[in-house]
Amino acid sequence: MNRVKIVFLAMTILITSLFYGCSHDESDGSGYLFNCTLLGNPQNLDPQMATDTSSFTIIKNMYSGLLKLDANGILINDIAKSYEISDDGLKYTFELRDNCYWYSKDFEEGEEVKVTAKDFVFAFQRIFNPQMQSPYRNDFSCLKNAAAIINGEMGYTNIGVTAISDFKLVIELDYPNANFLTLLTTPPAIPCNEEFFYSTKGRYGLDKESVISNGSFYLTEWFYDQYGPENIIIMRRNSFNSEANKVYPSSLKFNIEKDYNSQFKSFNDKKIDYLLTDVYTDKFNKKDYIINEYEGSTLGIIFNLNDEVYSNKNIRKAFALSINREELKSKLKKNDVSVASAIVPPDTVLLNKSYRELVAEEHLSEYNENKAIEFLKDGMTELNINSLNSVKILVAENMINSDYMHYFTQKWQQLFGVYIGFEIVHQSEYEQKLRDGEYKVAIYEITGDYNSVFSVLSKFSSDKNDFGYSSAETDNLLSRVGTISSLSDCVDIFRNIEKQIISDSSFIPVFYKKKYLIYRKTNADIIYNPFSGYIDFQYAKYFED
């Protein structure tokens, strides 16, 4: 990095810190510069293309969509002022607010550019434009004409999204989708200003000159040098939009860190305002810190279904039936995980409450050692073997403390006479071994791409998982969900999908993995989404001690 860039970057950080860091309204906690952190540089700030967590956090704070989720995962309006759904579930009509604005530093002073229905039309057309190759095309395949467009039978501009007027939008579907409103809270459903998009000449979302804001904050600095020590993103409050929907912080400054240890040290040294961690530590007591706990993913045992032994359902069933979850609960000493009997994690919301309140998990996974031994015997008879060979469980680094797994692997050793060890590898090697089938048994993490029961369970469809699970019954149940317009009508189907997957014993749920958002009590209302992984700062506040 040359000296000019270093001086410019230092001055940017200094001026922002001096001007915004000490300015806040003590009465409501607004006006504060939040010092934040990202684990890794955002790869793409184009909402129709982004896939990484760092990008999602910046996108969430820079853009607004039709709808959003509140701190409890409840669906609420954002740019949509109101909406109506036709009786057949095929037509969604949205009335938009007329006080949501685009902001770009390139706009002329005083220029006001409102977000209109046409911006949403253009965004959905981009998703289905074959030149875009958006990773979200299949997620919105329920849209009218989507199948024909995907098959090349119709042009992408025929996708069923229409601007009736500047502030009236109609979205039509080919078939009902009870999950559609939740889909509209995800990044690809964010509007796109066509004029600005084309002005970037193919650079949209890739640098600070090629982004535009219609949300809480706009980007003023994005500096990243993979070999340099000072990598930052700076965002400032979008004052146009704060008038209609108050944005509390004046600015956000993100330090781009390379690893968790750097984040932990920065928080411990009071250089950043929060810490996101999946390792609970007693260092942070509830007297001085707000500790928000999330359970958004499930850890389970998977088997290589191409392996001669573990492709046998009776062998897998023996392992599943031998896990005494009540005993396991009494053995856990730390708070990093809780014991799971089901697949869908507790933070998943359905009908404005935790799905686990609607579908109790206690009877989904059975424990019976005698049955386990019988299944093992039946399986070995079918395989014409007298014993199981030793096996190592494949685990990614930092996925789970191996001490937790010893509680049930020791039971397996006692019951089945098989030695079980662990192969702990880096995340990239773990993913490669899964793809190549270089494992017999592994720990696997299941979560949704967004807060949706369907999103979690769809990871078990035959074409969407990387561990070989395939079930015609599961696929059939998932396809039924995709044609139902009412979420309440989906509850029994979701219950049956969980039962089916668990009965196959290809994924044995064992733990819900926890994450913690920790911040000092001088701060309030920092919102984390455990599924998309973003942090929302719109309502974040700071109060003096």
Image (cartoon, rainbow, N blue to C red):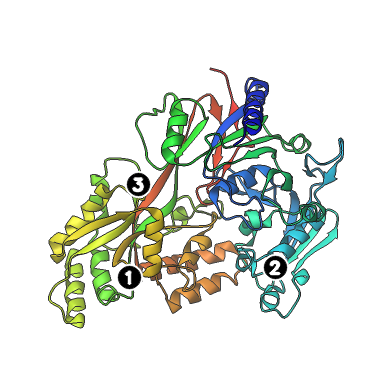
* Left or right: 285 as drawn, with respect to 349: left
The percent coordinates of residue 357 (x first, y second) are: 45, 53
Q: Is residue 35 above or below residue 459?
A: above
Secondary structure of the residue carrying tag 1 is loop
Of pointers 2 and 1, the one earlier in the residue sequence: 2
Q: Which residue corresponds to mark 3?
A: 337
**Residue type marked 2:** Gln
Q: Which residue corresponds to mark 2?
A: 131
Q: Which residue corresponds to mark 1?
A: 304
Q: Is residue 99 above or below residue 290?
A: below
Say few, some or many: other residues with alpha carbon within 10 Å of mark 2 (under 14 / 14 to 19 / 20 or more). Answer: few
Say few, some or many: other residues with alpha carbon within 10 Å of mark 1 (under 14 / 14 to 19 / 20 or more). Answer: many
* Left or right: 403 as drawn, with respect to 228: left
How many marks the image carries: the answer is 3
* Left or right: 102 as drawn, with respect to 323: right
Q: Are dots 2 and 3 in contact, CB under 8 Å?
A: no
Secondary structure of the residue carrying tag 2 is loop
Which label sits on residue 32?
none
Judged by depth in the image, the label closer to the viewer, 2 or 3, is 2
**187 or 365, which is in the foreground?**
187
